[in-house]
Amino acid sequence: MSQVPGPVADATGNWVDTGAPAWLRPYLRLTRLDRPIGWWLLLLPCWWSAALAAILAGWWGPNPWHVLLFLIGAIVMRGAGCTWNDLVDRDIDARVERTRSRPIPSGQVSPKAAGIFLVAQALVGLLVLVQFKSFAIAAGIASLAVVAIYPFMKRFTYWPQIFLGLAFSWGALMGWAAAFGRLDLPAYLLYAGSIAWVIHYDTIYAHQDREDDALLGLKSTALLFGENTKPALAVFSTAAVVLIGLAGVTAGAGVVFALGLTAFAAHLAWQICRIDIADPALCLRLFKSNRDAGLTLFAALILDAAVRRLL
């Protein structure tokens, strides 16, 4: 293992680099705790779903205990997913400028140590999962199949973003399952809308690696869409807004939700207008801005639940 755990090329100057103990830094980088945007994007569909369930149930808002559990679970399971992804992709990462400094390809963490660390994170995630109803536990376990196959998809299809969407949107089912112990139409619509949102934002993200992916024979929607990225993003962002809107309507959401959804849609439209696929730094900034779009929608769902309760 390397004597000096150096930073990752595309994530420098963060709290892991400046404040974490040197021996712990490679493992924190392996979980991407130095880049919180990933767990935010995994968390937001969980929170949306929990808030949407509150609207249907007539509650003041989502169950606070569930909100906290989803937060912990998203952080832990995003870390586990990144660890698994880096184990699978370690040879590819070593050949890409942006990723060759990650802990496994750079030698800071051995594959065996990463495997042990992966198991430890999964056990923490299981501890969080068993706090929910049995139906939600089963639903959470079922998600592991999609998570397991995702890292392999870019070797076989130009649509790996669909599989990322299936995995990262699973929370849209979990929040509802945790509240009711079942799944209903609003949850399925929210799940479909979230998948479209993931394809939108991860296509933006994938443009950072477009040239390296092409050289390595890997596939992505960024390569598939190319110069047609803007109209493709318009299709998926529109699908996301329509499907999420239908989820809200079928759950009984009202005007406050509609206003929040409009702000969410405007944010996605702004990303499309602003994007320059030849500017990786801009693509990264636009990708990260999806946290703000998602939080806007979550706030609208909570307020809608509260307003409906007052009325």
Image (cartoon, helix red, strand yellow):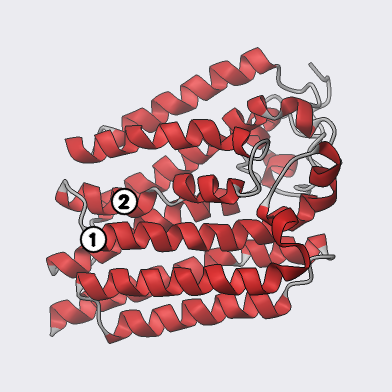
**Quadrant location of the C terminus?**
bottom left
Could you tell me the amino acid type at mark 1? Leu
Q: Position of residue 163 (x, y in %)?
A: 52, 45
- Is residue 121 rendered to the left or right of residue 309? right
Query: Which residue is at 48% across, 43% downward?
Result: 75
For mark 2, give the secondary structure. helix
Circle nearer the viewer, 1 or 2:
1
Q: Position of residue 279 (x, y in %)?
A: 83, 65
Q: Position of residue 188 (x, y in %)?
A: 30, 57
Tag shown at residue 185: 1
- 64 versus 24 height, above or below: below
**Which image quarter: residue 282?**
bottom right
Asked if residue 163 shows in the view, the reply is yes
Mark 1 / mark 2, whichever is N-terminal: 2
Q: Position of residue 302 (x, y in %)?
A: 30, 71
90 or 214, nearer to the observer: 214
**Quadrant location of the N terminus?**
top right
Query: Which residue is at 85% across, 33% downward?
Result: 95
Asked if residue 302 shows in the view, the reply is no
Q: Which residue is mark 2?
A: 173
- Is residue 26 rendered to the left or right of residue 292? right
- What separation in Å lies between label 1 and label 2 (alpha carbons)? 10 Å
Query: Which residue is at 73% across, 72% downward?
Result: 275
Could you tell me the amino acid type at mark 2? Leu
- 251 versus 46 height, above or below: below
203 or 41, nearer to the observer: 203
309 or 134, nearer to the observer: 134
226 or 41, nearer to the observer: 226
- Is residue 184 rendered to the left or right of residue 225? left
Mark 1 touches mark 2? (CB < 8 Å): no
Tag shown at residue 131: none
